[in-house]
Image: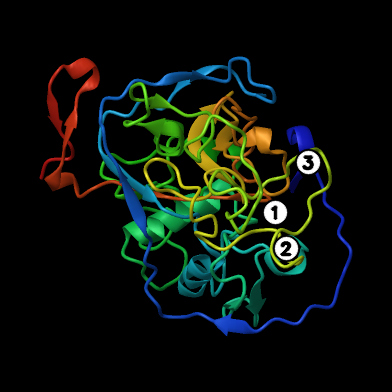
Amino acid sequence: MNLKKHRNVTRCIVSSAVIIFLVLPLAGKAVAIDTVQVGNPGNAGELSGASAPGGYGPDWICGGVDYTYNIGKYEITAGQYTEFLNAVAATDKYGLYNTNMWSNSYGCKILRSGSSGHYTYSVASDYANRPVNWVSWGDAARFCNWMQNGQPTGEQGLSTTEDGSYFLNGATSLSLLMAVTRKSDAVWAIPTEDEWYKAAYYDPDKPGGAGYWDYPTGSDSAPGRDMSEVTNPGNNANCMLGPDSPVPIDSGKYYTTVAGEFELSVSPYGTFDQGGNLWEWNETVFDSSKRGWRGGSFYYDRSHTAASDRSYSFDPRIDDYSLGFRVVSIPEPTSILLLGLGGAGLILRNPK
């Protein structure tokens, strides 16, 4: 299923084209995820959604996190996801691959070959370091389980994708996916909305005192779209500047940018593309039937990258050209102490 402006579900009809790619078979390589540390535990949250020009979700206090954690410096890339597929999706019991990844004009160019039981996956060389799209919330949770389990190879089961950070055990229905929660000993996970929001907008060193920027580029001004970051250094993102149809940003061909392309437009903690490129899933539950996502994408106006834009969330089974994800990494449970809510004391997380 696809998303449309104003967050309605629709189908995208795209014209066909003949494109030749150099396709890289990626197999047997460990996935290394660059992370940045998000410290300053116990920071106050802020009201998000109020007076938002395009804020479609309810007002909410966002960004307060009482522990130190790491978050992906970049969105999960097509190359990293291809490694995951080659490890666990020879049969693909739970639909981790979407054929739109290859065939859709906005797809991340992951190609599946062979037949069920013997599927293999490869990625076009010029897309390997661009973000993976056409992934559902359930797909992201299974990727996190695979990371949690040490990136094993084998069929999709309890030792690979169905247990770990989340107990899925074959969950594919709306009700079962909505019931999934992060385990207390999770090391790799989908960010909570607070974790995602803090990494994007909070600045402990903001002039005038610690607080939140309006945009995830360390700015209160809406971002531009200058890839060179010379004529307008910093504060740029891969998103539309107005309501026009999306146009390729890179060499007139690519809709998404490579990881780290906007080198002067990082968040205060050092993350890239928390505004633009792709919307990113988070764990938040809305109305008992939807999961959260934030950040805007190449397909949407830059107003949706704002902290105040708390967008509609969607059915966790949906995958789309405008949806991707990044992960958080919690330090080893035996090595951290978390500050209790309200400063009530220190809580040892998952003592052994």
Q: Amino acid at mark 3?
A: Lys
Residue 204, horizontal then vertical, whole percent: 32, 31
Q: Of the residues under marks 2 and 3, which one precedes in the sequence?
A: 3
Mark 2 touching mark 3, by CB under 8 A? no
Name the quadrant containing residue 345.
top left
SS at badge 2 = helix
Asked if 302 appears above or below 50 in the picture, the reply is below
Looking at the rendered image, the disc whose residue lies closer to the viewer, 2 or 1, is 1
Give the position of the C terminus as an image quadrant: top left
User: What residue is pinned by disc 3?
Assistant: 4
User: Badge 3, how many Cα within 10 Å: few under 14, some, many 20+?
Assistant: some
Q: Of the residues under marks 3 and 1, which one precedes in the sequence?
A: 3
Residue 307, horizontal then vertical, whole percent: 54, 29
Q: Amino acid at mark 2?
A: Asn
Looking at the rendered image, the disc whose residue lies closer to the viewer, 2 or 3, is 3
Left or right, 335 with reference to 23? left
Residue pictured at 61% horizontal, 64% vertical: 97
Of 276 and 159, nearer the camera is 276
User: Badge 2, how many Cα within 10 Å: few under 14, some, many 20+?
Assistant: some
User: Badge 1, how many Cα within 10 Å: few under 14, some, many 20+?
Assistant: many
SS at badge 3 = loop
Q: Amino acid at mark 1?
A: Tyr
Residue pictured at 60% horizontal, 59% vertical: 228
User: What residue is pinned by disc 2?
Assistant: 100
Residue 182, horizontal then vertical, whole percent: 37, 40
Measured Cα–Cα span from mark 2 to mark 3: 16 Å
User: What residue is pinned by disc 1?
Assistant: 321
Measured Cα–Cα span from mark 3 to mark 1: 10 Å
Of 275 and 18, nearer the camera is 275
Measured Cα–Cα span from mark 2 to mark 1: 8 Å
Residue pictured at 41% horizontal, 27% vertical: 63
Residue pictured at 19% horizontal, 27% vertical: 339
